[in-house]
Image (cartoon, rainbow, N blue to C red):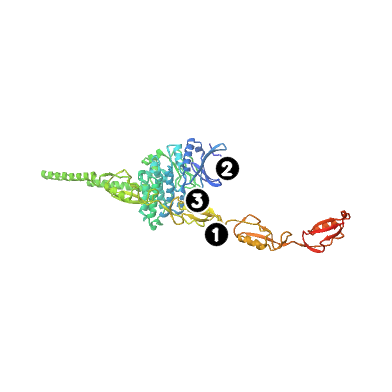
């Protein structure tokens, strides 16, 4: 199946719902478009899979399962999956994912612009990323491709991580011998072909933290295989090696996240989040704002277009602000080498390389950092060998007195017996004896310390925030419960500081959209929204909130809002026929403003000084609204001429012109049609007055 054109979908309608507007990014697995959801009238990101993946039924089944799992994940720091489906367009099978569209930039853009970040800013970005990962890990989802390119920063400041489960869908359904991921952030177990879990994401977080602090990645090479080798055979250096004076807690955090053995890392993002927030609260402002501008940052690694180590090489194309995860064996353009693409690695080749077997000089050549690590290891080995050689005797005991030799042997035996007894006591009953760490979860600190002292353990305290364990209660121990440990080794009690609390912002006078944005930034949720009329607060603005501003609440606590509907509308009564004074009193008493027209009008029905008409005549107005009134001058006066002697038809025409009415009384049948008498005559009367006519 071939593409039907360079950009076949632009302007097209997908699934009779998504109008494709423009292309955002293209990679080895899919092309991302900006589209409009016509049903809900909102922008979305439409991720259309490449044809070679759309034809794979097993892949589509797996992708559907991953999309359903990701769609159930609703979190402020995770890009939402909105829809997934398939469609035939021009005879070609098209498979797609619909995701939340987040206009803004990526964390990679921030790094490219700033080089490196202060600890305060780096930890703030990671807090949002790790919180989103924690929600995913709780739902059983593993990202597998955590990197700055997949961290999206909206124009309004929201931070979200995207592309959940896509690398897993490709790896599981297409080729069990391949591995999807970005080589700079791959954990050792992924390089060695082992199963990925939440701890693989934690490793990538550790690499990201190192990069955010120093402006460079810890492992670099001319080709990705060299970087993969270092992940397995080298330890991630401390950031303070590049930034002397950096807080030791940050070195420890990077080391903990990037331990080679997954068992030595935080078991998931929830565990890491507590420690991350603890460090943020314990470091001083000077440590959080530390910056060493004298450190010169190297240019980011510049991988060649053939960045894949498999039988089907692939590359990546990156448009600005793209978050595309690349997939299998689909060569594409390489537009921006500063972006770190998702790489396809052959598991066998990667594992063999990690064990040290290189098939080419290019693969065997280590980066300068890896060479320094190897050199240090060789120096340490040489020092240990020299120490062992120095401990070997160079001469033998000379022959001497037999009794003396026996005494020496006796002394040696006694010493050895004492040493053996002491060692036996130390490791059997003394401080070196093994004891099992009890389960102390939810115990008070004093209860836990008493229990450990009874077993012979000493204790140290580590305080962390926890959403579920009450304050001053034990969250867990290190080592974990039921693990055996020598008594002289201390047990770390992880003690709860209670849940992380957030300050409720002041939302009064804000509109609903601004209130939602502030709540989102403060990790709080929108609660019940009610409305009422208010004479002082403009419509749409917040009148009050509950809980009040400044109170401390757990994350996701709902905040109820009362919105103003503006002034209550006033029904407009009819005042037609009322005197001007009465109309003013009626309308003014309701809070309405009265405006009287400058010109009065004649009206035969409405007395002078009364209201002839009003605008508006009905409906409602807000308080202070204007009602326009027209006042009557009373009926118009007409001079009645004498019609005696005139023909009745001419008289009637004249009366109509004068807007007078008439009543005709005929004598002798009115044979001649001549007016012989009238009443009144030669006097002024109001328009509409009836003139009595007598006709002969």
The residue that mark 2 highlights is 12
N-terminal-most mark, 3 or 1:
3
The residue that mark 1 highlights is 536
Measured from the top left, where is residue 406 in percent x and y? 12, 43
> Please, which residue is most extreme toward the top here?
57
In the displayed structure image, the side of residue 495 where residue 555 appears, left or right: right
Helix, strand or loop status at disc 1: loop
Note whether 327 is above or below 458 in the view shown: above
N-terminal-most mark, 1 or 2:
2
The residue that mark 3 highlights is 528
Viewer-proximal residue among 225 and 182 = 182
Viewer-proximal residue among 125 and 465 = 465
Query: Distance from label 1 to label 2 (Cα)?
Result: 49 Å
Measured from the top left, where is residue 200 in percent x and y? 40, 44
Helix, strand or loop status at disc 3: strand
Find residue 137 and report its image quarter: top left
What residue appears at the point 37 percent right and 40 percent down from the top-left corner? Answer: 357
Q: Can you see residue 116?
A: no
Measured from the top left, where is residue 155 in percent x and y? 50, 52
Mark 1 neighbour class, 10 Å CA radius: few under 14, some 14 to 19, many 20 or more: few
> Please, which residue is most extreme toward the front here?
668
Which quadrant, please, contains the C terminus?
bottom right
Query: Distance from label 3 to label 1 (Cα)?
Result: 22 Å
Query: Distance from label 2 to label 3 (Cα)?
Result: 40 Å
Q: Can you see residue 40?
A: yes
Are the residues at dot 1 and dot 2 in contact (C-beta closer than 8 Å)?
Answer: no
């Amino acid at each position: 199946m071939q593409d039907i054109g360079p950009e076949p979908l632009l302007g097209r309608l997908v699934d009779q719902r998504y109008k494709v507007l423009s292309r955002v990014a293209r990679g080895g697995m899919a092309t991302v478009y900006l589209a409009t959801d016509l049903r809900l009238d909102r922008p979305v990101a439409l991720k259309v899979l490449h044809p070679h993946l759309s034809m794979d039924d097993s892949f589509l089944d797996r992708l559907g399962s991953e999309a359903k799992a990701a769609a159930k994940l609703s979190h402020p720091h995770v890009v939402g999956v909105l829809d997934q489906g398939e469609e035939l367009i021009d005879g070609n099978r098209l498979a797609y994912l619909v995701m939340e569209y987040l206009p803004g930039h990526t964390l990679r853009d921030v790094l490219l612009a700033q080089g490196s970040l202060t600890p305060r800013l780096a930890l703030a970005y990671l807090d949002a990323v790790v919180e989103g990962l924690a929600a995913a890990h709780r739902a059983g989802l593993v990202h597998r491709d955590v990197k700055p390119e997949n961290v999206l920063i909206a124009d309004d400041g929201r931070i979200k991580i995207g592309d959940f489960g896509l690398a897993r869908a490709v790896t599981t359904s297409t080729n069990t011998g391949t591995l999807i991921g970005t080589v700079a952030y791959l954990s050792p177990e992924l390089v060695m072909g082992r199963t990925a879990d939440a701890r693989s994401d934690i490793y990538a977080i550790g690499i990201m933290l190192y990069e955010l602090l120093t402006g460079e990645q810890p492992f670099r090479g001319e080709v990705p295989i060299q970087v993969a080798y270092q992940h397995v055979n080298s330890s991630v250096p401390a950031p303070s090696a590049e930034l002397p004076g950096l807080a030791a807690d940050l070195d420890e955090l990077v080391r903990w996240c990037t331990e080679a053995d997954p068992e030595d890392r935080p078991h998931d993002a929830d565990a890491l989040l507590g420690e991350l927030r603890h460090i943020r609260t314990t470091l001083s402002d000077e440590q959080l704002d530390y910056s060493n501008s004298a450190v010169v940052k190297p240019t980011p690694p510049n991988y060649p277009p053939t960045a894949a180590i498999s039988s089907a090489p692939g590359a990546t194309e990156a448009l600005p602000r793209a978050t595309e995860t690349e997939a299998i064996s689909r060569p594409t353009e390489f537009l921006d080498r500063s972006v770190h693409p998702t790489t396809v690695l052959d598991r066998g080749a990667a594992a063999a390389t990690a064990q040290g077997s290189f098939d080419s000089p290019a693969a065997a050549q280590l980066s300068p950092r890896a060479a320094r690590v190897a050199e240090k290891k060789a120096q340490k080995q040489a020092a240990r060998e020299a120490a062992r050689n120095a401990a070997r005797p160079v001469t033998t005991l000379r022959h001497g007195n037999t009794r003396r030799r026996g005494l020496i042997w006796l002394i040696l035996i006694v010493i050895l017996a004492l040493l053996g007894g002491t060692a036996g006591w130390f490791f059997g009953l003394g401080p070196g004896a093994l004891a099992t760490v009890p389960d102390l979860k939810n115990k008070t600190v004093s209860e836990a310390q008493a229990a450990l002292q009874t077993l012979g353990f000493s204790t140290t305290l580590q305080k962390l925030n926890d959403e579920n364990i009450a304050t001053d209660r034990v969250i867990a121990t290190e080592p974990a419960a039921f693990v055996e440990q020598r008594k002289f080794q201390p047990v770390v009690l992880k003690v709860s500081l209670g849940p992380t609390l957030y300050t409720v912002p002041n939302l009064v006078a804000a509109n609903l959209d601004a209130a939602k944005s502030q709540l989102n930034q403060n990790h709080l949720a929108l609660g019940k929204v009610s409305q009422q009329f208010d004479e002082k607060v403009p419509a749409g603005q917040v009148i009050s909130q509950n809980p009040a501003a400044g109170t401390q609440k757990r994350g996701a606590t709902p905040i109820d809002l009362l919105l103003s509907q503006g002034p209550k509308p006033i029904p407009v009564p009819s005042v037609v026929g009322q005197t001007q004074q009465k109309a003013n009193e009626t309308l003014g008493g309701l809070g309405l403003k009265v405006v009287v027209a400058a010109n009065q009008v004649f009206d035969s029905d409405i007395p002078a000084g009364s209201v002839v008409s009003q605008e508006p005549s009905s409906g409602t107005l807000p308080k202070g609204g204007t009602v326009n009134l027209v006042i009557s001058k009373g009926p118009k006066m007409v001079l009645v001429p004498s019609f005696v002697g005139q023909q009745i038809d001419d008289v009637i025409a004249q009366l109509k012109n004068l807007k007078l009415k008439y009543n005709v009384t005929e004598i002798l049948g009115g044979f001649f049609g001549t007016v012989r008498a009238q009443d009144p005559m030669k006097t002024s009367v109001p328009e509409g007055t009836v003139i009595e006519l007598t006709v002969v």
